[in-house]
Amino acid sequence: MLKRTAWCLALVLLCAGNTFAQLPSIIEKDGRHALLVDGKPYLILGGQAHNSSGWPAMLPQVWQAAETMHLNTVEIPIYWEQIEALPGKFDFSLVDTLLTQARAHNVHLVLLWFATWKNGSNHYMPEWMKKDAAKYPNITGLNNKHIDSPSPHSKATLEADIKAFTAVMTYLKQVDTQHTILMVQVENESGSWDSMRDYSPTAQKLFEENVPQALLKPEVLKALSIPAGTKGTWQQVFGDRADEYFQAWSISSYIGQVAAAGKAVYPLPLYVNAALRDPLTNPHSNTYESGGPTDNVIPIWKVAAPAIDLLAPDIYLSGSERVLKVLELYDRPDNTLFVPEAGLVADNAKYMYEVIARGGIGFSPFGIDDNGHGSTPEELNKRLAPYAQEYAVLAPMMRELAQWAFEGKIKAVVEREDHAEQTIDLGAWQATIAFGSGRENTTKADVPPDGKVMIVQLSENKFMAIGTGCRITFHPTGENKDRAWQYLKVEEGSYDNGVFKPLRILNGDETDFGGPRFGNTPKVLQIEVIVR
Ligand code: DGJ
């Protein structure tokens, strides 16, 4: 009897253990994605530290910013030059410090592996590699021009990165059984500035060979706008895009091998980030970082680097048309949308709503910590405020948002530069969103275009709306199109651990003049409408 009880207890503990120790993973259903953390959809309300802030002396500033922002996930670099300062001798003390302190501050981590590429350069390679340029070369530009970007054709560099990244992932598996670390970014904004590709003799020989079969599959050629059946050399198949596509293939194959080696020992979600090109004009590749995961070469990266779970856009472009286009291009059935970096400016916060509505798994402004500038707490608070006020509202409902986003129940609109009214179709209802003059106490001319709203469809007639800087109103559609309607109840409230807690019922002046308004700080409204 005792034996059976002990056996049952062991089984229960084992099951509980499995539940709590589930590896973060990305799942896909009907073209939508979710990041599962502890087995449930999770939304990264993130913040990325500055490049040189992953050192113990700088971490207090990072945690202070994290707390001020109410974020749930800190993105922070780990440095090859520090981890393997001597060849083959690995030092994971910074990883230990990050884990201990992140847990003490109750946040998750996304680690950024600054290694072969950091913004297209080799600057985070260990000194012993930088000192041996013959063994770990940079690419060669046209006319033998020196280019500050590592060669993806160097076997020695690839082997060294594979060895180091595998050691990192092996260590993470060993020390992070509670899964503080959700994902790892492999390299940072890979690609090359100042040269579309490597023109070294080794690279040139490969460039003159035939395009690999894997890229000639009809679906891949179609995605690259090349007629099916085309074959031959890079130049013959890809014409004036040959240099860039060759560079993309070379870099993605390299990073794909680094990622696959790391994933084989510890299968955490892995991603790469992109320094974007203008998504509206199909610019020439000598105007942006060539070979990185820009929108036009996503199909190449998908073929060459299957161990990379997602390609992620870093949002430093401006203009709503441009940014919304980027989000559309990276939100694909075969690519989970995630914004690991966005300029820390107030205007960018609105795009987080679009990311959530598209079923994206997270958003993170870049450079949250003070970076040793000695700002006052007031200055820091002011800088972080646009995100702090969003996260304060979204964090207590993060799990619900992530689940709704995965189920496709959220729709969003963001204010355009012309403040034009927009609509959201919600089945039996259509919502009209007025910006500009919809703001409390302002007129159309004097507001920045930073309004936004996301509407969650709770049932046919019931919605949750979260937003700022706009006014919403509803109209019945379909057979009820011409019928009278009214608000049954509009409740303003907030979430507390996943439960909506109403603060008051909005009525009278707060709903009578064209529908409920959202001011400068985010509000959560539960709205029920009826036809009469
Ligand atoms: C994008 C890079 O990915 C970041 O590491 C950082 O260098 C920013 N640009 C610049 O602020």
Image (cartoon, grey):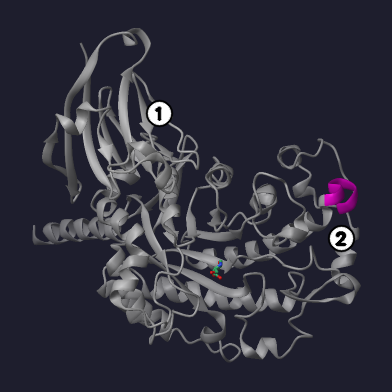
x and y, in percent, of residue 276 in the image:
62, 56
Q: Residues within 10 Å of mark 2 (few under 14, many from 20)?
A: many
Residue drawn at x 31%, y 24% as measured from the top left? 474
Magenta segment's dominant SS is: helix
Q: Residues within 10 Å of mark 1 (few under 14, many from 20)?
A: some
Is label 2 within 8 A of ligand 1 (CB to nearest ligand atom)?
no
In the rendered structure, which amino acid carries the disc numbered 2? Phe
Which numbered disc flags the more N-terminal residue, 1 or 2?
2
Residue drawn at x 58%, y 87% as measured from the top left? 88
Residue drawn at x 53%, y 59% as measured from the top left? 271
For marks 1 and 2, give the CA distance.
Answer: 49 Å
Residue drawn at x 11%, y 58% as measured from the top left? 5
- Does residue 52 appear in this view? yes
x and y, in percent, of residue 330 in the image:
56, 47
500 over 392 or under it: above or below: above
**Residue bearing mark 2:** 207
Please state if 276 lies on the left or on the right of 349 as rendered: right
